[in-house]
Image: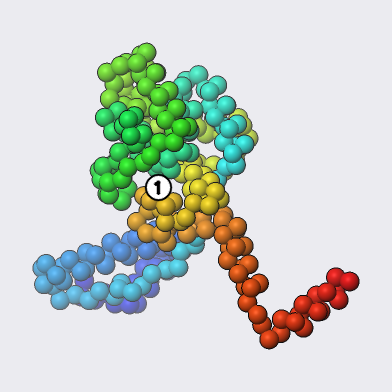
Amino acid sequence: MSKLNAASIRGYISHRMQGNVGPATINRELCTLSAALNYARREWEWEVPNPVHGRKLREPEGRVRWLTREEADSLVVIAHQEANAPHLPDFIRLALNTGCRKGELPGLEWDRVDFVQNLIHLEGRHTKTGKRRSLPLNQEARRAVAGRKDFCAEFWPDSPWVFAHKTGARILDVKRAFTTACARVGIADFRIHDLRHTCAAWLVSSGVPLAEVRDVLGHTTVAMTERYAHLAPENLRAAVAALDGLKSRFGHGTQAREENVIA
């Protein structure tokens, strides 16, 4: 361990990149190594260097794939035709209208659904960030949850799971049925997690501030939400329009030239 140096880290990075490992994965590995070295230095008083400190590869922007309203409606219609997955339409609708992560919905229990306040409660153990948050249910999301309630009442009223089979057992994954539905409607390169991207895209496109979108999605910082900022061009249009009100010493000449061009 005492022989670790900058060259060791560069060599490791080069080796991993030759194996077609992405920058994000390499950064996570380096972060783990750095944390282990810092722990050894702090808790065990090891005299070891930490050549990882300050080294981070540039990562590409995260993937943003989202559906139009028309595509989403078509997907839900097709999902209703999946006889072996009666839960799929409600799953899609709830994901689109709450921005929940893929892993947050299959584990949703009825005692965390508040029909009075129209909220879904997520404790720290249910979220990726480990932080508690509550998600408001709009009308479409409430209808989706109510649909699951009717299903459970008919087949297994005592099931604790919102997304349950007719036996009352928890539905662990919807990937196969979801992929089939996407293929049937002609939606390519679309994953379950992209339902979350779609929710964010719709919110930003509707003019919802990024800070509020961050809170809905449960991002730790608004920087994570900024990947969707380009979907709100109207906000930028209003911003640059303010420049029209600024007088420039070249303003009159520019205006005259523009008028000549138009003429």
The reply, left or right, for residue 135 in relation to residue 189 is: left
**Residue 149 placement (x, y as % from top left):** 37, 22
The reply, left or right, for residue 101 in relation to residue 187 is: left
In the rendered image, the vertical position of residue 119 relative to residue 244, given as above or below: above
What's the residue at 50%, 48% (across, down)? Answer: 203
How packed mark 1 is, by other alpha carbons closer than 10 Å (few <14, some 14-19, many 20 or more), is: some
Q: Residue furthest top?
A: 154
Q: Residue furthest left?
A: 44
Q: Nearer the viewer, residue 196 or 3?
A: 196
What's the residue at 31%, 22% (across, down)? Answer: 169
**Residue 11 placement (x, y as % from top left):** 38, 71
Placement of the C terminus among the 4 image quadrants: bottom right
In the rendered image, the vertical position of residue 194 relative to residue 76, given as above or below: below
Tell me the kind of residue under disc 1.
Val
**Residue 94 placement (x, y as % from top left):** 44, 34
Residue receiving disc 1: 216
Label 1 residue SS: helix
Label tally: 1
In the rendered image, the vertical position of residue 215 relative to residue 98, given as above or below: below
Q: Nearer the viewer, residue 27 or 259?
A: 259
What's the residue at 40%, 24% (across, down)? Answer: 146
What's the residue at 58%, 32% (across, down)? Answer: 73
Q: Residue furthest bottom?
A: 249
- Residue 20 visible in image: no
**Residue 45 placement (x, y as % from top left):** 11, 72
In the rendered image, the vertical position of residue 130 relative to residue 73, given as above or below: below
Residue 211 falls in which quadrant of the image? bottom left
Placement of the N terminus among the 4 image quadrants: bottom left
Residue 42 falls in which quadrant of the image? bottom left
The reply, left or right, for residue 125 in relation to residue 102 is: left
- Residue 155 visible in image: yes
